[in-house]
Amino acid sequence: MGQKTVRFSDLTGQLIMQDDALARIVIHEHPDLGDGPVEIEAMADEAKAIEHGALPVAIVDLYFPGSDEPSRVAMAAEEFNKLCTERPVSELLASASPARRAGKAASRDRIDYASLEHAGTPHKGKTTDAEKRLVSENLDVINERLAAQGLRTISLSDPEHVERYGLEQLAAEPLVAEQAVKA
């Protein structure tokens, strides 16, 4: 007995009859997109319709004074071209300097575990003193965030967690209270 896989277009729900009619579509940017690129499947004809309906755009990062992060915008290439009044846009782009990769740009992509947003999140790297301090001072808040994200929480009864985050003093506190009750 054999098996047959049936595929449907994620766009229209139509049955995709043959593998060669299947197109893979990766969505990098969309106003409703969450954390990063996603992938869907559709019929090749549907993907061609996307290609034919595409607009020529200029995707530009704007670095405003006093702002640490750029603002990324997409605009019709024709509208961008109208902004170039000194010379044709093709000349401007051909003579422009390559974009700089500043040291901050590379570090911008890294997760800052010494921030309340990421402290305590499981990672392979070294736990910095700043992250340890944040975890120690905000353990309940961090554990709530971790639980909400479906990640393991930090346990004062787990020796590895206590050591990794320098929680020896917090881990000892319940013992002190417990011993006072027994006395």
Image (spheres, rainbow, N blue to C red):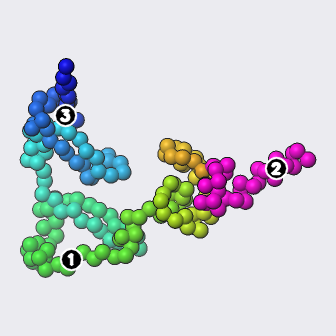
Residue 98 included in the magenta stretch of the image: no
Residue 171 included in the magenta stretch of the image: yes
Residue drawn 24% across the image and 75% down it: 99
Seen in the picture, residue 73 relative to 3 is either above or below; the reply is below
- Alpha carbon distance from label 3 to label 2: 61 Å
In what element is the residue under mark 2?
helix
The residue carrying mark 1 is: 98
The residue carrying mark 3 is: 9
- Alpha carbon distance from label 3 to label 1: 40 Å
Apparent side of residue 11 relative to residue 181 in the rendered image (left or right)? left
Q: Which mark is residue 155?
A: none
Q: Amino acid at mark 3?
A: Ser
Q: x and y percent of residue 179 in the render?
A: 85, 49
Tell us which disc is closer to us: 2 or 1: 2
Sequence order check: which comes first, mark 3 or mark 2? 3
Q: Amino acid at mark 2?
A: Ala
Apparent side of residue 155 relative to residue 98 in the rendered image (left or right)? right
Tag 3 and tag 2, C-beta contact below 8 Å: no
Which range is magenta?
A: 155-183
Apparent side of residue 111 relative to residue 51 in the rendered image (left or right)? right
